[in-house]
Image: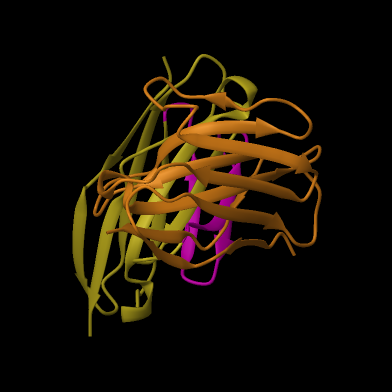
Chain colours: A yellow, B orange
Amino acid sequence: EDQVTQSPEALRLQEGESSSLNCSYTVSGLRGLFWYRQDPGKGPEFLFTLYSAGEEKEKERLKATLTKKESFLHITAPKPEDSATYLCAVPGGSYIPTFGRGTSLIVHP
Amino acid sequence: GAVVSQHPSWVICKSGTSVKIECRSLDFQATTMFWYRQFPKQSLMLMATSNEGSKATYEQGVEKDKFLINHASLTLSTLTVTSAHPEDSSFYICSAREVGFDTQYFGPGTRLTVL
């Protein structure tokens, strides 16, 4: 059974304080890993898809990396508007995704 | 690109009535659409997967007679909550996967409140 574990559950940062979120996974055959951002009361917003170990993708202050067992979402010099819940997911059979429980990030000004 | 809309964004209804939620992929064709339910401060719970022109596949524990899903075209799926009760109150989110691609794109969600 595919499993996705995200850590930490919650993270509080000061504006400008860089950090990383972790997503570890167990799948029978990796067909990609997705990162999403979810604001309260809204649907998840797509950020990145990573397909192979060593791959990296960047978007503004966010950089996602992938190894054979985990993915990291690095946040460089975060701003209060980066506050959100970050979700990762891996597609399983029929591309039905397994989601982690998410990391709730709060960035204080 | 890759925009998914949902309508309505919120709905309040009386117990015993039925509510229909629409999910549309606006700028792409979706072979597969997914319906999720989310409780406060919890992650997404997959309810069902629908493929265009086929019957939906429901996750274990989801009542298919209560949550009717129709995926009539490559751009539209609907979720009908039949005989709604207060315990059906939740945030319902759909997502769509573009033909030939892996990534799912999510709608903005529908807040359902059953009185």
Q: Quadrant of residue B68?
A: top right
- B63 above or below B18? above
Residue A47: % across, % down? 55, 57
Residue A54: % across, % down? 56, 38
Instruction: Confirm whether residue A2 shows in the render.
Output: yes
The stretch in magenta equals A43-69
Q: Is residue B41 left or right of residue B81?
A: left
Residue drawn at the location 41% of the way across and 20% of the way down: B60
Q: Please state which of residues B5 and A61 is positioned toward the viewer in this rendering.
A: B5
Q: Quadrant of residue A30?
A: top right
Q: Please state which of residues A79 and B80 is positioned toward the viewer in this rendering.
A: B80
Q: Please state which of residues B73 and A67 is positioned toward the viewer in this rendering.
A: B73
Q: Quadrant of the C terminus of chain A?
A: bottom left
Residue drawn at the location 60% of the way across and 37% of the way down: B69
Report if residue B45 lies within the magenta region.
no
Q: Please state which of residues B72 and A62 is positioned toward the viewer in this rendering.
A: B72
Residue A66: % across, % down? 50, 39
Q: How many marks?
A: 0
- A55 above or below A109? above
Extreme residue in the front direction: B16
Residue B56: % across, % down? 62, 28
Residue drawn at the location 42% of the way across and 27% of the way down: B63
Instruction: Confirm whether residue A56 shows in the render.
Output: no
Residue drawn at the location 56% of the way across and 45% of the way down: B79
Extreme residue in the bottom direction: A109
